[in-house]
Image: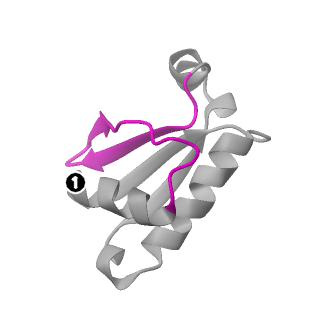
């Protein structure tokens, strides 16, 4: 299963969320989950869709993406784990 993070370089919110996600995904419970970070500046369609929304989390299941609710920048890694579990990770 893929967890996708749409982000852009230099975005402190994106970097903070990526760091917390990496902490969560290093746990045994999330062994089958791969974090994919997509730089929105590399594709026009991503940039148009997410330029005002980043960071954006999505999950990919069977080739389809589902956007997940955006966690608060103050979300702890523990709270983020709960969110991931709620959405099937």
Please give the name of the residue rendered at 25% of the width and 44% of the height, measured from the top-left corner. Answer: 63
Given the current orientation, which residue lies at the most extreme right position? 10
Say which residue appears at 40% left-offset and 58% top-offset.
79
Residue under the point 19% across and 48% down: 62
Where is residue 23 shown, x and y percent of the image?
53, 71
- Whether residue 1 can be seen here: no
Residue 87 lies in the magenta stretch:
no
- Looking at the rendered image, the quarter that the C terminus falls into is bottom left
Colour pattern: one colour
Which residue is the site of mark 1? 86
Looking at the image, residue 52 sits to the left or right of residue 34; the answer is right
Residue 32 percent coordinates (x, y): 31, 73
Q: 43 and 8: which one is in front?
A: 8
Instruction: Write the start and end of the magenta stretch as one range.
Output: 53-76
| 50 vs 3: above or below | above
Direction from residue 16 to residue 28 in the image, left or right: left
Q: Pinpoint residue 20: horizontal percent, then vertical percent.
A: 56, 62
């Amino acid at each position: 299963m893929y967890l996708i993070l749409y982000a852009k370089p230099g975005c402190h919110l994106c970097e903070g969320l990526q760091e917390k996600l990496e902490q969560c995904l290093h746990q045994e419970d999330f062994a089958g989950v791969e974090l994919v970070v997509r730089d929105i500046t590399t594709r026009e369609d991503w940039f148009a869709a997410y330029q005002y929304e980043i960071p954006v989390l999505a999950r990919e299941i069977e080739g389809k993406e589902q956007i997940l609710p955006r966690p608060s920048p103050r979300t702890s890694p523990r709270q983020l784990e709960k969110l991931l579990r709620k959405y099937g990770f």
